[in-house]
Structure formats: C-alpha cells, structure tokens
Image (cartoon, rainbow, N blue to C red):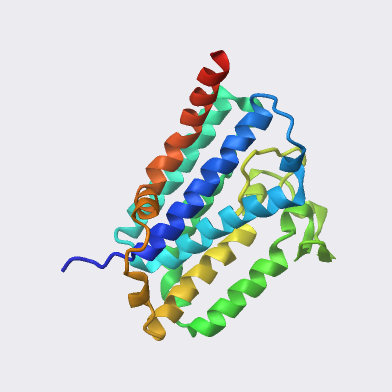
Amino acid sequence: MKSRRYFALDGIRGLALLNMIAYHAVWDLVYLFDFHLQWYQSEGAYIWQQCICWTFIFLSGFCEPLGKEKLKRGITVFSLGFLIVAATLITMPQNRVRFGVLTLIGSCMLLMVPLEKFLQKFKPEYGLIFSIALFLLTKNINHGYLGFGSLNILPLPNGWYRNFITTYLGFPMSGFYSTDYFSLLPWLFLYTAGYFTHQLFIHHKLLAHLENSKAKPLEWFGQHSLGLYMIHQPLLYFLFAALFAL
C-alpha cells in the first residue's frame, strides 16, 4: 500500500528552506564578502534565524513517526552533518561548522530508534508539555545557565563544560567556536515536542488535514530539502563570487 503524502508538511519545510537560504545568503555577504549590514546583528535577525531552526527541528520530530528505515535515515543525516564539518574545516576553517543542525537532527533520529517505545508510554498531551518545559528550562545551558532568553534561573557548574563530548551534549568547552552550533540539549526536547504533536494529531484524527496540496513550488522545495541544503551554500558562494568578479 502506497504511503500517504502530507503536502502541507512539505510546504512548511519548503518555506523554512527558502528562509534559510535567504538567511545564509545574507550571512555570506556579511562574513565572506565584507558587506556592512548592521541589522544582521540585531535582535530581529536573531529571531529570524531562530524561527528557521525551530521550524526544521520541530518538523523533523513531527515527521519522525512517518519515516521508514529510521536507523538508515539517521545514519545518513548524521554522516552528512559530519561531511559538512570536514568540508568547512578544510575550505574555511575560520568559519568552521562543528555540531551543526544536521548532526543534531541525525542524532535525534538515531536516539529515537531505542527511545520511541519508551516515549509511546506517555500520553501525547503530557509528553508535549514535558518536552516544551524541558526545552525552555535548558535553552540557556550553552551559556552556563538553566533558563530561557534573559531569564537565567540557575548557574551550572563550570566543570560540566570540559571537552568535545560535553560540547556535543550542550555544555561547550572553553574556546569552542562554530558558525552553526546545535547541541543535543536543549534541541532534543524541541524534537520530541514535534514527535508528541504528531501523536496528538493522530489521536484527534487531524493528519488528513495535512494531505491537501496548497503550494506546489514550496512543496517541491520541501520534498528535496536535504539535497538542496547540502548544495545551497557552495552555490551561493560561487554565485556571489562570480557577480563580484564581474
């Protein structure tokens, strides 16, 4: 039996992808081609960037129950994340990526293989509330605190921030730098929030509302998001380099 296609999810993913490409295009202009754009350092630009990331991670969690060959898929995404690490370390080490968003999403996919049976024991409502609460509570752990935004509830021990393993988990070691850093915590909890939202959609029979095709161009981008993600930065760089050469 042919599996259903939820075109609305493709459209949302496609919109997030185009937003990400636009954001990275501005990043390239500012950091690689020395454009002066003060707004890019503003709170508005940060909110734009966070909205893109939140959408991808939450949507990945929402789509987790829909996937087949989950172990293989997780290994593939994680490996592509490692490929990006290697490529940036070789070609532009000053703008290197370590523990980027693909490494995170691949890690979440792999963790869900053993965890899913355990998570299924929770009622979706409680799982969603618990996931959101943990995400908000741990949002600032990269900066040494439990808390969210400007609300730092509790400082965390300096000894937790020691090496690459703690950095991967969410406690970056001294001197760590990455242009794209998404640690396992707090983002795993946003991923599970997406997962439990999917379970709520099943419980309330809402998935059928996501089947209708509304915006085919966006859906096309969403259906090819992984491949486009992998090639968009090299294409942007060579496009800008060619334009400025002219």
Count of labels in the image: 0
Q: Is residue 12 left or right of residue 220?
A: right
Residue for point 41% across, 41% down: 228
Identity of the residue drawn at 59% across and 42% down: 23
Give the quarter of the figure containing the N terminus. bottom left
Q: Nearer the viewer, residue 37 or 114?
A: 37
The answer, for residue 171, to whether it is visible in the render is no
Q: Compared to 63, does 75 lie above or below?
A: above
Q: Residue furthest left?
A: 1
| Quadrant of the image occupied by residue 53 | bottom right
Pick the residue in front: 84 or 165: 84
Quarter of the image for the C terminus: give it.
top right
Residue at screen point 61% across, 31% down: 28
Residue 117 percent coordinates (x, y): 41, 75
From this viewpoint, is residue 91 visible?
yes
**On screen, 54 above or below 197?**
above
Query: Residue 92 at x, y = what percent?
Result: 59, 25
Residue 31 appears left or right of 200? right
* Image coords of residue 138 (percent x, y): 70, 64
Hey, which residue is sitting farthest top in the picture?
Answer: 246
